[in-house]
Amino acid sequence: KNQVEQSPQSLIILEGKNCTLQCNYTVSPFSNLRWYKQDTGRGPVSLTIMTFSENTKSNGRYTATLDADTKQSSLHITASQLSDSASYICVVSDVWGGGGADGLTFGKGTHLIIQP
Amino acid sequence: NAGVTQTPKFQVLKTGQSMTLQCAQDMNHEYMSWYRQDPGMGLRLIHYSVGAGITDQGEVPNGYNVSRSTTEDFPLRLLSAAPSQTSVYFCASSYSVGLAADNEQFFGPGTRLTVL
């Protein structure tokens, strides 16, 4: 069964510090990997989408990496701000089939708290 | 564009009651889906639709019905609410099914449902 495991489950850091969130997956065949940010009480919003051939992708202070050989991804947040407090969800898409019926396997998310 | 809209934002039901969660999108997306999000679990697919008149079951369809009479609307019906259906429900849409890397998925703001 396709799986996406995220770590840590929760993380507290001080404002201005950097942090890295991890995502390991066993989805096969692989199509793409997405990181979403979900603010409390809101729906997920896409941060990055990475395909097999992409190693690194940035979106402002967010940088995602992908190692398709080891099936690992990370999301690095630089110079954290209070507004970064949210849940970060890793989602892996297969080439239609397996995972969920829509080809998506969701991680449980990492809950990040930025303290002033 | 309003994007993906959901109503109501909050709802409390008694066991056995029925209700419809509304979802609409104004992006002319063919693919729409419903997820539920429970504490400690990833988003789970309930039902999805690849176009008007076409729906299919996801991972957790029991107790829910859907229909898709127009491209814009994708309502989710709870036939006889049970406490196990207490959850946050998200509707999502994307241009097409298969979620290739250039096919971003947009989520609505969610409906928080409590069944007593």
Image: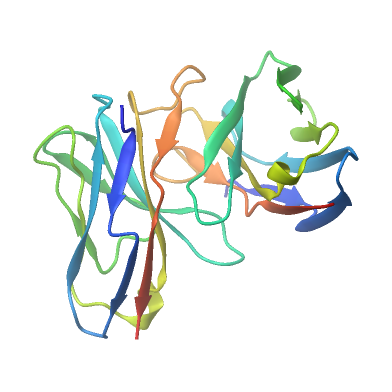
Q: In which quarter of the image is residue B16?
A: bottom left
Observer-nearest of B53 and B9: B9
Q: In this view, does A17 lie above or below B12?
A: above
Count all numbered tags in the image, as a single digit: 0
Q: In this view, does B18 lie above or below A53?
A: below
Q: Where residue A5 sits in the image (x, y, percent)?
A: 70, 50
Q: In which quarter of the image is residue A63?
A: top right
Left/right of residue A44 with respect to residue B72 in the rendered view? right
In the image, what residue occupies the spot 71% across and 42% down?
Answer: A84
In the image, what residue occupies the spot 57% across and 67% down?
Answer: B39
Left/right of residue B79 with respect to residue A5 in the rendered view? left
Q: In which quarter of the image is residue B29?
A: top left
Q: Where residue A105 sits in the image (x, y, percent)?
A: 54, 44
Q: Where residue B63 sits in the image (x, y, percent)?
A: 26, 69
Q: Is residue B107 above or below residue B87?
A: above
Left/right of residue A101 with respect to residue B37 in the rendered view? left
